[in-house]
Amino acid sequence: MITLENERLRVVIANQGGELQSIYGKQTGTEYLWQGGAAYWSGRAPNLFPFVGRLFEKRYTVDGLSYPMGIHGFAAQTELETEEAGPASCVLLLRDSDATRAVYPYRFEYRVRYTLDGSVLRTGYEVTNLSPGLMYFCLGGHPGFNVPLEKGLSFDDYQLAFSEPSEPRLIGFSEGGLTDGSRSPFPLLNGTVLPLRQALFDGDSDSVFLADAPRGVTLSSPKGSRGLRVTWPDMRYIGFWHTPRLNAPYLCIEPWSALPGREGVVEELSSMPERTVLAPGETSVHTWTVEVW
C-alpha cells in the first residue's frame, strides 16, 4: 500500500490495479471513498484499461485475429509497480508482458499518477505506445463514494449538480450491458440538477451514462455540509452507478474516454468508435479529479 498525505487529505492506494482504497478528509473526519462490501459491491475505485465496460461475446479483433477480454479490461486485476512515491504524489506502472500480449497485442507502458493539492486529489492515466504501429485503447475511472456522507441523511437526500446548464443525452444499453445505439434526451432539474433516488438504478439499466454533459459535477445534500466535486476534462462520458435493488449506500461517478462495445458487434479495435489512437512512441494523458469538503 502507498499512503499520500497533506494537511487536508490522507489517501491510500493499492498496487493491485493502482486502486484507491481510501480518501479521508482530515479536517472533516470523513471517509469519502466507498470501502467495499460483499453485500453490495466489493470494489472501491477500479482503474479501467484497455477497455471500459463489456464487449459482445467477451472478445474483439485486431487485424482479423480474435482476442478474449473481460469486463473493463485487465489493469484492475493486475499488480502495478511503484515507480515513484513521495509524500503527496506517486506513480504506479504497468508494462506489457506475455500475459497482457495474449489478450492485448501491443507493447505499452500504462501509468496511474496520483497527486494531492489541498483538498483535491488528481488521478492521471498516462499511456505510451511502444509498438511499431498504431495502438488503440479505451480507459476510465470507476470510483465509488459513500452516500450518505453524514449521519442522519439518506441516499435520497443527495443530488448531483452539474457545473453549468446543459441538455445531456442518455446512452442506451441492452440487457447485456452493451450499447444499443440510442441517445435520448435526459432533462435535468433547472438544467443542472439530478436528484438521487435508489429507484434511479432499478430500471432496465442499472446505470445512467451521459453524453454532452458538462465535465464537472458536485455530489452533496441541501440538508448537509459535506460533499465532493468530480471533474473530468479529458473524458467524453460520465456515468453514475450502484448495485440495483439493494439500497446500496454508495454512488460510483465514472468518467470514461469511450463507451462499451455494441450489442451484436464483435468490435474490430482499429475501427471501434471513439477509442484513443496512439502513434509509435506517443503518450496520451487523461485526468479526473475529486475535491472534498
Image: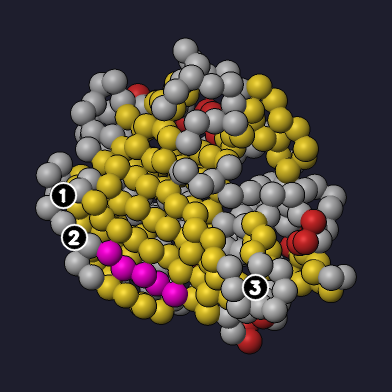
Numbered circle sitting on residue 5: 2
Q: The residue tagged with tag 2: helix, strand or loop?
A: strand
Along the viewing direction, whichever of 89 and 29 lies nearer the viewer: 89
Give, as a three-letter code, the residue at label 3. Pro
In the rendered structure, the answer to whether residue 138 lies left or right of residue 77 reads right
Q: Nearer the viewer, mark 2 or mark 3?
A: 3
Residue 205 location, quadrant = top right
Instruction: Indicate whether 92 appears above or below 193.
Output: below
Locate the C terminus by quadrant.
Answer: top left
Q: Which mark is residue 280?
A: 3
- Give the mark nearer the N terminus: 2 vs 3: 2
Which amino acid type is marked by label 1?
A: Arg
Residue 200's image quarter? top right
Q: Quadrant of the N terminus?
A: bottom left
* Residue assigned mark 1: 8
**Residue 222 location in percent, x, y?**
29, 20
Q: Furthest residue to the bottom?
A: 98
Q: How many badges with numbers are in the image?
A: 3
Classify mark 3: helix, strand or loop. Answer: loop
Spatial distance from mark 3 to mark 1, Cα to Cα?
Answer: 40 Å
- Which amino acid does the dot numbered 2 rest on? Glu
Assess disc 3: are there few (<14), some (14-19) or many (≥20) residues with their C-alpha within 10 Å of its C-alpha.
some
For image coordinates 66% across by 67% down, the residue present is 279
Q: What range of the chain is rendered magenta? A: 89-93
Secondary structure, mark 1, is: loop
As for residue 92 lying within the magenta part, the answer is: yes
Q: Residue furthest top?
A: 190
Q: Nearer the viewer, residue 258 or 32?
A: 258
Relative image position of residue 100 (x, y in whole percent): 62, 78
Is 171 situated above or below 282?
Answer: above
Magenta span: predominant SS is: strand
